Amino acid sequence: MRGGLILLSLFMSLPLSAAELIIKAPLRLLAVSPQQSISGSNLTLSPGEHQLLVRYEGVLPARSNSESDIEVTSDPQVLHVLVKGDETLTLSAPQLNSESAMEQYVKSPAMTLSGSAYPEQSLRQQPIALKGFVLGIDYQDLLADHLRDEAAATASPTAAASQVATASTVAATAAVTAAAMAAPASSTAAAADITATAQSREQALQQLFLQSTPEERKRFIGWAVQQF
């Protein structure tokens, strides 16, 4: 009886469904979030979003004993993978047979995900450019740092947009107030036009801000702060 309860408890602790991810050479898995132990080229992923840090590592065998193998590697790529349920997924890259083709590929290494419930599709991926001495780098920390920066960049535009909208509203209100004080009562229509124009500019500014890339938003925020 006790043994049956233990087995039942273990069974209930297991995920109801999970996907097996197969990472095909010449791709190499460096880190994963949420973090788990990495062994070999296969992963078990629970339903939900996961972030993988993957690198292309192409190798051309030496043509003679006097030569060395040619290795071509890409910068680490952050891949956002959404697991929907119990299936087998395969992450792959093109099989290239020349150094020139590999060198061209690693400039923008597009990888694909395929599975029983997926059509083959391109992944949303972002490169992490490594600088300086990289031997012994902790790739799990590198992935965590990237995801923190990404979350901060996503949150900052919302706060910045609110600040810009507040500043625009204050400026518009001040303009309306000044116009109302300088003009007689008959200028009510003109003040309304000023308010409408200010609101239109504010909406256009917010729309352009939300359509910008994170890099463009950072540059704009830096410029806007300098104006105060």
Image: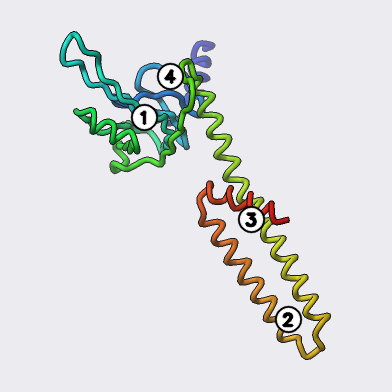
Which residue lies most toward the left here? 64
Q: Which of marks 1 and 4 precedes in the sequence? A: 4
Residue occupying the far bottom of the picture: 186
Disc 4 versus disc 3: distance between alpha carbons? 40 Å
Amino acid, disc 2: Ala
Which numbered mark, 4 or 1, is in the foreground of this view?
Answer: 1
What is the x, y in percent for residue 40? 36, 17
Q: Which residue is mark 2?
A: 191
What's the residue at 58%, 49% (across, down)? 219
Looking at the image, tell me whether mark 2 or mark 1 is earlier in sequence order: 1
> Residue 108, image x and y in percent?
34, 38
- What element does badge 4 sit on? loop
SS for dot 1: loop
* SS state under label 3: helix
Q: CA distance from mark 1 to mark 3?
A: 36 Å
Whether residue 182 sits left or right of residue 42 in the image: it is right
The residue wearing badge 1 is 74
Secondary structure under the numbered disc 2 in the rendered image = helix
Q: Is residue 148 above or below residue 190?
A: above
- Along the horizontal axis of the image, is 181 left or right of 86? right
Say which residue label 4 marks.
38
Q: CA distance from mark 4 to mark 1?
A: 20 Å
Give the spatial CA distance, label 2 vs label 4.
65 Å
Residue annotated with mark 3: 161
Residue 151 percent across, percent down from the top left: 57, 40
Q: Residue at position x 56%, y 30% from top?
A: 145
At x 66%, y 50%, the residue is 159
State whether residue 200 is above or below residue 64: below
Residue type at numbered disc 1 = Ser
